[in-house]
Image: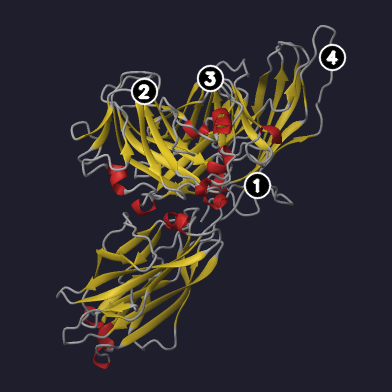
Amino acid sequence: MKKLNTTKILLSAAVAASLSACGGSDSNSKSSANNAPTHNGNLSVTVSENDRASTINLLNGATDLDAGDALRVRDLTTTEADLSGITENFFQITVTPSAYKDSLDSGETKEIVYTYSVSDGKQDTPRTLTIAIEGYDEAPEFSNLTRTFSEEAGSRTYNLLEGATDADGETLSVANFSQAETNIDGAATYANGSVTIDASVFADDIKGGDTVTFVFNYEVADHNHSLPRTLTVNVTGVSTEPEPPTVNDTITATMSTADSQVMVDLVASPEIIDWNGDDVTADLSTLTPVDDAPAFNFALSSGNTLVVEPVAFYSRLAEAETKSFAYTYTVSDPGGLTAQATVSLSVTKDAVAAHNVMPNASFEDGTMAGWTQAPTQADGTEVENFAAVVTDAANAKQGTNYMQVTGDVKLSYDLTGLLEQGSSYYVELPARDKSWGNWYGSISEGLTLLTERFRFSDHGWNPGIYLSHTGTFTVDDRYVEPALKIESAGNLKLDDIRLVKYAFEQANNILSEQDSTFEDGSAGNWILGGNSTISNTTVIDGDYSIYATGGGANDIVMPAGSIQNGKRYLLEFDIYSPDFAPDNHPTRAWILDSTAVDGSGNPINTNAEVFASTAEWRTIRFLDAATVRWSMIFDIDHTSHLDDWATRETMLRLETNIWGQGYTYAIDNVRLIEIP
């Protein structure tokens, strides 16, 4: 049960998390020598205990009429004793609502009030900030249980709270337990939250091919909720004559493309039963697609469990379409007797927006909820370096709002609970107004980098266009409390940030496996530049890689229909530089709408007047380590004015040493896939 704080304030209405101005400035005083600072009212912010940490700028809406007067915060005070969820940083306050989860329940609110002065160093103007943190009690989460065992096992005990969780961390209990009237008398007993079934009670009455079913109804309770749950147990009879597993039905699973991983038990009962009571095993290596189901590897699968990343089916479906994909496989018993089983996956395609796991990535609520920031100046007297939401549809990539970063700022977004173990994600950071300066992104835990640092450079000739900068990563057990970190050197705008799961399957790769991995020792369909060869000495993965000893372009032609309007594509490849040195390893990738070249071998691109201005199609990426995964997103309709891409033979071009450097590179695992 929660420990309840005795000092609580009840709100008459729940308010969505927002930063708002209340009333007007407390001072409009002026002096002949100096104007006092003014502001647009006291500040208030309302958040839920489940919201992520966010930063409040105490100088938001404050101005000074005197040119050159830098505003600052003075005399920041509060009477609140419990500041466990508050961090003060000069002119900013960061609120971490989860720090108060144990002291707040549904309908309760904790209010923290700060008083301070907005100062120009000569005159002060009073102001207050009120932070309201609304409590919310999470209900237990679980699904019904179905279990099977054979009569020869004798007895089995089942924990009725198996798999039940509570986001508040409360201890759960079993309430109102009852058995179905059809249960065999005396065969099942309940004690201390568990049920034991003794099959010996009815063993003489059950034979091979028979099933006895027990049903138990009860409630899973915390201090505030009590929700119904059912446990169903099937006890199967045992046959004395050896029999192969019996496949009674197709195993099915339903999902949509934005869902988390789906675990499918390939030997689930009653679809598959062994009447000898033997354990049944599924052979994942025999998984074979039926009809137009794609030949996926389902690489996360193991044992008898098929692990499905639903997003892998994204490119196989039309918008909102639902379609079933079937696969056959072999099941066997310990004696080697086999049968063929089928699993059918029903998949629905979600809208693009449903795949973005970041709650506040487009800033359309007008706040920076979830984002924290720190300026590079540490003395608190200079406030030129900060990030804030700006409403200006003409300068936004999507909607009406964007984030304006001014000066050198370190931004962070807590990703705890948003990422799934074993899954891969791309982070897309559309930015503009940067003009050649380097800036960086990474996934970190505290000061520890969980990913390689993504180093970006915008094109200087037209910085007024949003360019999509991308990094990819796979979540492992190091990702406990991850955060997206962005380090900006100078000004830029950010909008329509995306953190989206993707799943690589070679069956979805526009490039063939040979053109991706070079494992037969040839260039396949690639046209290598004059300084490039296929090498078995400087290799990233497997036995062969492209090896480039200088500048030049490596091209591969893709047939018409490979690239289409209305779609987005992720290009990634591994690149390794044996003679890596920081700060000077530019590489570049293009997708060209034509395979034509001029007399000097340069591409003739009919889309050039748009591409040359946006330059997203050939983003330059600097290596920040000797070996990196190079990633880039091609958003065809955002970049291109052409509406007939599906009819065009296109070309992918990878370039190294684009300014004549003499570094050496290996390139491998080239992948081009459609993404949400």
Tell me where residue 274 sits by quadrant: bottom left
- Rendered image: mark on residue 109: 1
User: Residue 195 appears in which quarter of the rendering?
Assistant: bottom left
Q: Residue furthest bottom?
A: 205
Which of the two labelled residues, at mark 4 and mark 1, occupies the earlier sequence position? Answer: 4
Image location (x, y in percent) of residue 429: 52, 35
Name the residue tied to disc 4: 30
Nearest to viewer (mark 1 / mark 2): 2
Element under disc 1 = strand
Q: Earlier in the sequence, mark 2 or mark 3?
A: 3
The residue under the point 65% across, 35% down is 396
Task: Determine contact: label 3, label 1, CB under 8 Å.
Answer: no
Callout 2 amino acid: Asn
Q: Name the residue: 34% across, 27% down.
A: 625
Coloured how?
Answer: secondary structure
Q: CA distance from mark 3 to mark 1?
A: 34 Å
| Three-letter code, disc 4 | Lys
The answer to whether 115 appears left or right of 670 in the picture is: right
**In percent of the image, x 38 and y 82: which residue is there?**
214
Q: Nearer the viewer, residue 245 or 647?
A: 647
Report how far apart the C-alphas of labels 4 and 1 lie in the structure.
Answer: 39 Å
Horizontal arrangement in the rendering, residue 343 relative to residue 356 (left or right): left
Q: Closer to the observer: label 4 or label 1?
A: 4
Asked whether 519 or 385 is in front, the reply is 519
